[in-house]
Image: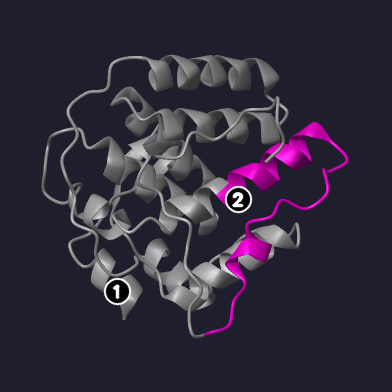
């Protein structure tokens, strides 16, 4: 991602994916392509990459479980759910959950919101979230629950494909089967600003891995 823009603050535990038996060259996939011709296209690309890397975190599945049947704010789970909705094409739902996560102290979610607004040409809103991300990044961190690393939230081949799409400068999207899992999520009552808001289900992690 280019310097001087809304740099993504990935969590300290976010991994650099390791090569697997598919022969994928992760170093190549994580190398940013040439700059895009416009600011909003560059932001959209950086957001695609950010969402893909969030979903690749070894704690992504455990983070989603925190949102199930729990009334407390869990910014880690909201960050992951927002990324999942984003790559499934549910941008309004992603924005809602990223705002929820940023309200809980997630500077990564605030960075994603800045990139989202910039990709839409909403530069004033993008700047607000960029400054919020910087504030959260340097401010005191709320106590974080220690999460156990598990199997990846998405199959390794799907994660590789998302990063490959990023590398080629194409829009990221989930395969149809996994997108259908996300689109079947239970929906809360319509929000006047965001419309239908998908909620995490008790079977989501298992359905994505199946």
User: Is residue 166 at all visible to an observer of this figure?
Assistant: yes
Please tell me whether residue 112 is drawn above or below residue 67 in the rendered image. above
Mark 1 = which residue? 207
Picture residue at 60% right of the left edge, 31% below the top: 7
Question: In x, y percent, where is residue 68?
Answer: 16, 51
- Mark nearer the viewer, 2 or 1: 2
User: Is 30 included in the stretch rendered in magenta?
Assistant: yes
Q: The C terminus appears in which quarter of the rendering?
A: bottom left
191 shown above or below 22 = above
Provide the secondary structure element on which disc 1 rests. helix
Question: What residue do we see at 28% from left, 26% from top?
Answer: 104
On whether residue 104 falls in the magenta region, the answer is no
**Callout count:** 2
The residue that disc 2 covers is: 48
| Marks 2 and 1, the one that precedes in the sequence | 2
Q: Residues within 10 Å of mark 1 (few under 14, many from 20)?
A: some
Q: Position of residue 88 (x, y in %)?
A: 51, 59
Lateral position of residue 46 relative to residue 138, left or right: right
Q: Residues within 10 Å of mark 2 (few under 14, many from 20)?
A: many
Q: Is residue 35 above or below residue 181?
A: above
Circle 2: element type:
helix
Of residues 72 and 91, the one drawn nearer to the viewer in this rendering: 72
Query: Which span of residues is magenta-colored?
Result: 22-49
């Amino acid at each position: 991602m280019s310097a001087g823009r809304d740099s993504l603050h990935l969590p300290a535990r976010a991994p650099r994916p390791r090569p697997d038996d598919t022969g994928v060259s992760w170093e190549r996939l994580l190398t940013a392509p040439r700059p895009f011709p416009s600011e909003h296209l560059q932001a959209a690309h950086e957001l695609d990459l950010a969402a893909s890397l969030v979903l690749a975190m070894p704690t992504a599945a455990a983070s989603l479980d925190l949102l199930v049947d729990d009334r407390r704010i869990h910014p880690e789970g909201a960050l992951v759910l927002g990324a999942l909705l984003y790559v499934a094409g549910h941008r309004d739902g992603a924005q809602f959950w990223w705002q929820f996560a940023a309200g809980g102290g997630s500077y990564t979610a605030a960075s994603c919101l800045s990139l989202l607004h910039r990709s839409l040409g909403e530069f004033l809103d993008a700047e607000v979230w960029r400054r919020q991300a910087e504030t959260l990044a340097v401010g005191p961190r709320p106590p974080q629950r220690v999460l156990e690393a598990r199997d990846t939230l998405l199959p390794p081949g799907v994660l590789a494909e998302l990063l490959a799409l990023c590398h080629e400068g194409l829009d990221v999207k989930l395969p149809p089967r996994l997108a259908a899992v996300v689109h079947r999520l239970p929906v809360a009552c319509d929000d006047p600003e965001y419309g239908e808001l998908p909620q995490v289900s008790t079977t989501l992690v298992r359905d994505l891995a199946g």
